[in-house]
Image: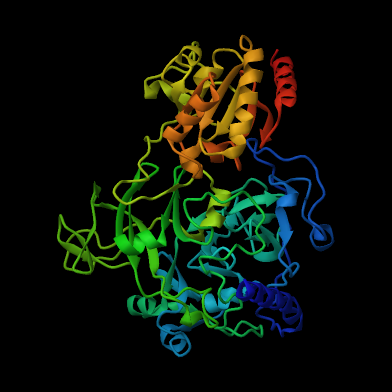
């Protein structure tokens, strides 16, 4: 306990010092931030639900010209990280050196972020990103932002173009769920680094395009890309590059720093290191401990066959006093596992990555290393390093990979608005509810008579013409145990007018499986319709950040109210009465 408190004190001192040193640093003309250019005010996308006006984070209106009337996250989720706007200075005019030059100061296991666009490859050492968090760069003709959030261990690259506008990013000095919030200098929109989503301002609701980026040890990078360019330490700022101000932070027994957010699902410790892949609305986390043991994992995520490789030789950036001396945690990378149009399977043989069908060998960069007349490279898949608490806060529907099965296997993607293709009709009239944001399949536990089948699309239930109360819950959720009987009673009071449906999301939140859900139903004597869904993305689509969550729908699919946490019977009854009035 004493050591941990000492570590946090050092972090606070160092973070505060960043503000002072940034103002005192000499910035040459090549690193000065450009004046923002005039940008047309974008329209908020029609499918984006803005939150009501509220007080912006303290001091934000003095520092930013952001349109704070537009936001999709509660302002009370945003905290100060210590330094204010640009207190941690982004790099805007980066300089580069050769691999031979960088080899004079980079050590073999020292982590760098590798980014490749076309045939051009660059390395961005974590020792530099640790102190700047954002590098605005252009690789080939693609403007990119290479970012690193030390508190979440997230190294992510984005394309800086959106809707024809090239953006330049800086740091807001704010955090959400301990994660860096960036801003662009053109509109001063605030962007969440972990997800690439615009959360406050003109570009609210927009999504930055991810660029594949790999955190890899220097020795492996230089051996594979001897002609690449490396970000120079000549940044124009005075920093002790190579030192780690967060020494000891990634101790598995630590708690996240400056974290206020949803409870972290308990399958893994909050500070467990995971590699995450999200494809077509399906999200899977691969624990580093499992990857180290397996070394090669063949999986399917969102209907896409992928392969993940683990290789030793990359130091943790957040372990020792010096970045290069951190514990060897290895690296994980992901690729599509298709060769010449065929889905293949990889395995480890005598320490080498092998595709046994052809006998070819491969390296961790997805490149063939033996004679082959076939494809020479695998197509990279965007995957991101996280601490478990960080990823789970933003993607609570995530499933954790378990050896012995393809955790990412999902129902093939189907346009939910053409449910005939899934051999079901969209309700009695075959029409999709006009205001429904996203459809999903329900595998019914009980209430077949009420819902109309053992497998039903949510759109089919709405098509019965009654308002619907949808309750997200889980078998091991303590609050659900108290709240579900209230939902049962309120639903029974309006049994002929409203359909109440419980959706078990325990497998996606770490709060129980189907057996736990059925046991709780029996224990509480619940009788209203219940089921689960194979579509993990339903939690993201309906922005479920905690359970229980209740959402009230009109028959057209319009959401008119929602609650997260305990509500109580009287409030539920009033909300159902309001729903009936609106639905008339």
**Colour setting:** rainbow
Q: Image quadrant for the C terminus?
A: top right
Q: Please state the horizontal and vertical placement of residue 321, each as a whole percent of the image.
A: 55, 82
Q: In the orientation shown, which residue stands out farthest toward the right? A: 62
Q: In the orientation shown, which residue stands out farthest toward the front? A: 523
Residue at image location 52% in from the left, 22% down from the top: 459
In the picture provided, is 397 more to the left or to the right than 180?
left
Q: Please state the horizontal and vertical placement of residue 328, each as a whole percent of the image.
A: 41, 75
Residue placed most toward the observer, 560 or 164? 560
Residue at image location 15% in from the left, 61% down from the top: 359
Q: In the orientation shown, which residue stands out farthest toward the top? A: 496
Residue placed most toward the observer, 223 or 340? 223
Residue placed most toward the observer, 581 or 374? 581
Q: Please state the horizontal and vertical placement of residue 412, each as a whole percent of the image.
A: 37, 35
Residue at image location 29% in from the left, 49% down from the top: 404
Whether 537 is drawn above or below 144: the answer is above
Q: Quadrant of residue 353?
A: bottom left
Q: Image quadrant for the N terminus?
A: bottom right
Residue 188 seen anywhere in this rendered image of the structure: no
Q: Quadrant of residue 257?
A: bottom right
Q: Please state the horizontal and vertical placement of residue 246, each as a whole percent of the image.
A: 59, 75
Residue placed most toward the observer, 99 or 582? 582
Whether 102 is drawn above or below 275: the answer is below
Whether 91 is drawn above or below 395: the answer is below
Question: How many tags in the picture?
Answer: 0
Residue 307 seen anywhere in this rendered image of the structure: yes
């Amino acid at each position: 306990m004493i050591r941990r408190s000492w570590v946090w004190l050092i972090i606070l001192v160092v973070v505060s010092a960043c503000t002072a040193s940034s103002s005192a640093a000499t910035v040459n003309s090549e690193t000065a931030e450009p004046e923002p250019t005039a940008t047309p005010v974008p329209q908020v996308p029609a499918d984006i639900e803005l939150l009501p006006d509220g007080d912006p984070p303290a001091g934000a209106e003095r520092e930013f010209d952001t349109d704070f009337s537009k936001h999709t996250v509660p302002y009370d989720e945003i905290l100060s990280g210590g330094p204010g706007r640009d207190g941690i200075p982004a790099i805007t005019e980066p300089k580069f050196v050769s691999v031979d030059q960088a080899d004079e100061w980079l050590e073999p296991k020292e982590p760098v972020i590798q980014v490749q666009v076309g045939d051009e490859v660059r390395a961005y050492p974590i020792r530099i990103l640790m102190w700047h968090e954002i590098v605005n760069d252009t690789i080939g003709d693609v403007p990119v932002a290479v970012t690193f959030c030390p508190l979440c261990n997230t190294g992510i690259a984005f394309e800086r173009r959106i809707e024809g506008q090239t953006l330049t990013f800086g740091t807001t000095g704010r955090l959400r769920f301990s994660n860096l919030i960036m801003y662009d200098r053109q509109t001063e929109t605030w962007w969440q680094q972990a997800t690439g989503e615009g959360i406050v301002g003109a570009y609210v609701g927009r999504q930055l395009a991810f660029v594949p980026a790999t955190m890899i040890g220097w020795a492996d990078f230089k051996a594979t890309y001897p002609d690449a360019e490396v970000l120079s330490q000549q940044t124009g700022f005075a920093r002790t590059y190579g030192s780690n101000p967060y020494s000891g932070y990634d101790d598995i027994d630590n708690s996240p720093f400056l974290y206020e957010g949803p409870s972290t699902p308990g399958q893994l410790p909050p500070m467990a290191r995971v590699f995450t892949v999200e494809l077509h609305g399906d999200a899977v986390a691969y624990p580093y401990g499992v990857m180290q043991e397996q070394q090669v994992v063949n999986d399917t995520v969102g209907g896409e066959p992928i392969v993940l490789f683990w290789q030793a030789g990359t130091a943790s950036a957040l372990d020792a006093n010096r970045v290069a001396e951190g514990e060897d945690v290895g690296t994980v990378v992901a690729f599509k596992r298709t060769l010449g149009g065929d889905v293949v399977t990889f395995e480890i043989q005598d320490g080498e990555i092998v595709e046994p069908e052809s006998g070819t060998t491969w390296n961790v960069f997805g490149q063939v290393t033996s004679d082959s007349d076939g494809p020479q490279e695998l197509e990279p898949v965007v995957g991101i390093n996280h601490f478990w608490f960080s990823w789970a806060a933003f993607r609570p529907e995530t499933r954790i990979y378990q050896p012995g099965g393809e955790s990412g296997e999902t129902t093939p993607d189907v346009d939910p608005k053409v449910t005939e293709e899934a051999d079901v009709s969209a309700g009695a009239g075959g029409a999709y509810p006009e205001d429904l944001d996203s459809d999903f399949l329900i595998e019914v536990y009980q209430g077949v008579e009420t819902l109309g089948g053992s497998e039903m699309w949510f759109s089919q239930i709405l098509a019965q013409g009654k308002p619907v109360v949808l309750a997200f819950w889980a078998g091991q959720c303590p609050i659900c145990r108290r709240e579900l009987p209230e939902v049962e009673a309120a639903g029974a009071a309006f049994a002929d007018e409203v359909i109440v449906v419980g959706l078990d999301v325990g497998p996606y939140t770490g709060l129980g499986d189907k057996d736990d859900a059925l046991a709780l139903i029996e224990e509480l004597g619940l009788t209203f319709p219940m089921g689960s869904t194979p579509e993990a993305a339903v939690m993201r689509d309906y922005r479920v950040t905690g359970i229980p969550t209740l959402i009230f729908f009109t028959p057209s699919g319009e959401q008119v109210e929602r609650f997260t946490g305990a509500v109580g019977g009287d409030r539920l009854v009033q909300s159902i009465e309001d729903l009936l009035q609106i639905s008339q």
